[in-house]
Every structure is written in C-alpha cells, then in structure tokens.
Image: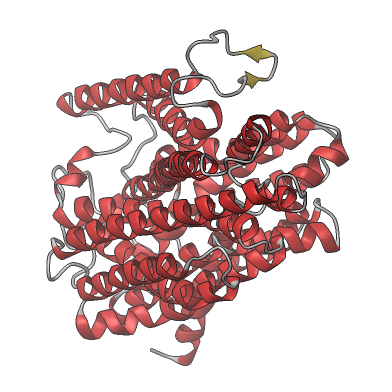
Amino acid sequence: MSGRDRARRRLCLATLSVGVSLIMVDGTIVNVALPTIIGDLGITATDAEWANAGYTLVFAALLLPAGRLGDVLGHRRLFALGVVAFVVASALAGQARGGPSLLLGRALQGAGAAMILPATLAVINTAFRGRDRAMAFGVWGSVIGGTVAIGPVLGGWLTSAQSWRWIFTINVPLGAAVLAGIALWVPESRDPRAVLRTGVVGTLAASAGFAALVFALIEGQRYGWWTPTRPFRAGPWDWPSSAVSPIPAALGLGALCLGVFAAATGRRRRRGRPVLLDVTLFAVPSFRIGSIAIAIVGLAEFGLVFVLPLYLQAALGASALRAGLVILALAVGALLAGPSAGPLAQRHGARTVVLAGLLLETAGIAAAGAVMAPASSPWRLVGPLLVYGAGVGLASAQLSNVVLADIPVERSGQASGAQSTTRLLGSALGIAVLGTVLVTTLGAGLDRRLDTLDDMPPRTRDAVSEAVRGSLGAGIPRLLDRPDTAPAAAEAREALTEATRRVAFLTAALMLAGVGLGWRLPRDAGARPGVGRPPRPEAPAEKGRPL
C-alpha cells in the first residue's frame, strides 16, 4: 500500500469516527443541561423530558429503514445525508425559543443519527479488508463505547462555561468538517438491485414497534411499570387512566406492531418480493450470536452510565463535574484499548479478542462493586472503570467485525441497521432492568434501615423516604445538611450504596452470560469477511474500492 493510500484510509476512518461520535455524545449530553434549559426557555419538565426522549425514539424507529436506504442510495450518500440532517437539526435546537422548536430539533437529530450509524458501519464493512478491516472496526468500536461517557462531562462543561445552546451548535462546524471528509475520502458502496419497495405496512409497523418498545423500556421507571407513579402527557393529550400507567399499553403496542412486521415480512418473502429486513440473516451463527452479545454490552454500558452518577453524587457527595471526570475513565479505557483490538484480532482471532473484552468488562464491573462504600473516595472507581472501558473497547470493536464478517457486502445496509437496532434495544433494556433493580433495592434497604431509628418521628421518616425514593437518592445531600434529617439521610446513603453495589454485581453476572455467548461464536468468525451467504441473495453488490 502506498503512502497516499494509507493516508486516505486513515482520513476515511477519522471521518467515520467523528461522525459516529457526534450522534453518540448527543445521546447523553443533554441530560445535565435539562434544568438550565427548563429555566431559560420557560418550558415544563415534561416538555424537556420529551425533547430528550424524542432523540432516542426517532433514532430507534428509523434504524432499519435507514439501513435499507443505504443499500439503495449508497452508504456514503446516506452518511452525507444523515450528517446534513443532523447539522440542520442541531442548529434548530441551538436556536430554539420554546418547547416545540426544541423538540423538533431533537427529533430531526434522531433522524440524522439513524442514517449515520448504519451507514458508517456499512462503509467499514465494504471498504476495508484484512488487517485494515480489523483496525477500522477497532477504532469504530472504541468510539462507540467511549463517547457515551463523554456526553455528560462535555454537556456540563459547555452549559456552565458558555451556554446550553453550545451543546447543539458545536455540531455545526464539526458536521461541516465531516461533510468535507466524506467528499474527499469516503468511498461509495451499494446494492444496485436493492429497491425501496419493501412494503409500507411492514416498514411503518417496524418503526412504530421499535419506538414503542424503546419508550416503554426507558420510561417505565418514570411512569410506573403498571401502577401510575406520575401523570403522562404528550403535547395536549393526557393519559386517561388513573389505574394503569401507559407503559403496559406501549409494550403491547410494540409487540403488536412487531408481530405485524414479522407477518408482513413473511408474506412478502413467500411472494418473492423485497423486504425491509431479511430475517434469514439470523440463520448465520456469527450474526445471530454476535447481535445478542452486542445487546448485552449495550445493556451493561448504558445501565452503568445511568446508575453510577447517582451513586457518585448522592452517596459520595461528588459534584456533577467530578462525577463526570470519574466516569470519563470508562471512555479513556475504551479509546486506548480499541485501536489495539485490530492487531490483536489479526494475531489471535476476533473471537478471542471478544472474549477477552467481555471478561475485562466483567472484572471491571465486579471490582467497581467491590470498592463501593458510603465514605469512600470517588477516585477509587477510576481503576475499575479503566479496566471496564478497556473491555468495552476490545469487545465492541470486534463484535461488530464478527457480526458482519459472514454477511455479503450487498446486505451490509440492512445488516448494519439490524445490528444498530439490537444495540439500541440492549441499551434501553439496561436502563430499564438496572434502573428497576436500583429502585427496588433502594426502597427495601431504606425501609429496613429507617425502621431502626426508633427516636425519629414517623412524619420525618416518611418525608425522608419519599424524598429519597422520588429522586432516586439525589436528595440525600440536602437531607444530610439538616440536623433533623441527617441521621435518616446517613441511612439512606448506606441503602443507596448497597443498591448500587447490587446493580454492579448483577451487571457483572449479565456480562458473564455475554462471555458464554462469545464462547459460542465460530472460532473463525471474522477471519474471512464478507464471504458468508445468507439465503436468497438478490445480486452482487457494487462494492466500494477497498482502502
């Protein structure tokens, strides 16, 4: 390879990585700025929450259609279209003057993100070969795993140092740089015989089903899994029932829509018509097993990022910035380990690297749980999080390689969309499962500990219990400052620490399940990229020139 080709390869990968980092950071960057946005725009907390959730819901709804669109239009073209949409949406959100314009901007950001994620993955799968392929997946995976933890730190710094509007407008110049990189260095690839006519009913059902499912998983703890814990409002419409929360309805709607999607897809396949997602892709062992493992990695990472800030700030009294710097160790570990995943995969095989990464994640999470204590320093978590992040960098990097290795390049778009959807569902499931375990364990431990305070008035005990439960422990520092509630707050801090520790150990156990799945991957997974053949290939692809 000439020096010019080597430089082109690196610049292409840098363009893909910056594009992915934009959409991953924006998934978590807004959380810390919500109180400031509410005060500045004069909107309700519900409006702000919908502006935050709207990004994820549109993202989830459009991943599969976007993957198929990439096969038709070309993955490079879809990448550019996604970046344009994301930049325009970011400018709109950054100039928002009220709730509607902010929500519109966030929804359009989600649409752009849905185009960017599968497009970048498909470009890597089609344009990189051999040693370069393993290296490219290593960098891409470490960016995916590492930038999730950067969002809260960057959002907090921009909001405090400049303005909350900067968390959106900073995407404009970065997006412009990505567009320039696409024009100069990213090759095109597509399936010339792929068509968009994949069935309106199936496409709409898939989009609605995944959106409803992600909404239920993310918001279940907020609105109650069965009994309502707070009113639900979507624009001018209020949820009519006071006995049942909207979450069971959302789960039912998601299941119904996905059932319609499966039926419509099966009917079209029997008639020989093109479909949005060829389910026979899951007959390929590396694709099927690797996709489930990706979901488990997403479950652990997003669940951990959701739970750890509560422990650091409420139990240990760390500031938001300090907590963000501690969690940043996860990103550092991922970004350091990811680039080495490629050479390691070349030497020992992708399956071995995946197993090593999953084991490091398990060890890091377990070690984090072991060092958690109410009076410990937040910095004690840096070492375990570095280990965990290194595991994320290795496992995420090569899991994507393994999942797509035996999928022909002409199916890269829909396979990438399916993998990205699986990752997002795993992330939502992590927030749902680990968040529920945290709340349940916190409530039980708090009741048990408060019952030992015989000299505390029942009214004070009830007030403390309600404040701690309602804020998921965030109200503990304020309660510690009051002499009448300080003893109860100390017990609440112990209960939160115990709950967070249990969540960490449960996450480690789930990661062990991921290790078991990784062990079932074919030994030669990733060794021969792009040579597998799922049933009924439509046509040879128009391949991008390998870099």
The quadrant of the picture occupied by the C terminus is: bottom left
- Locate residue 335 relative to residue 195 in the image: left or right: right
Quarter of image, res 25: bottom right
How many marks overall? 0
Q: Position of residue 343 (x, y in %)?
A: 32, 84
Q: Residue furthest top?
A: 240
Q: Residue at x 43, y 30 (%)?
A: 207
Quadrant of the snapshot with the N terminus: bottom left
Image spot of residue 130 (x, y percent): 28, 78
Q: Is residue 412 left or right of residue 248?
A: left
Q: Nearer the viewer, residue 250 or 316?
A: 316
Task: Name the residue rendered at 45%, 51% in the picture.
Answer: 499
**Front residue (pair 116, 402):** 402
- Does the rendering let one see residue 544? yes
Please say whether residue 66 is visible from this viewpoint.
Answer: no
Instruction: Classify residue 235 as left or right of residue 182.
Output: right
Q: Residue at x 71, y 57 (%)?
A: 171
Rendering colour mode:
secondary structure
Res. 459 image quadrant: top right
Q: Position of residue 261 (x, y in %)?
A: 31, 25
Residue drawn at (42%, 37%) of the image? 65
Q: Position of residue 202 (x, y in %)?
A: 34, 24
Q: Nearer the viewer, residue 69 or 40?
A: 40
**In the orientation shown, which residue stands out farthest toward the bottom?**
3
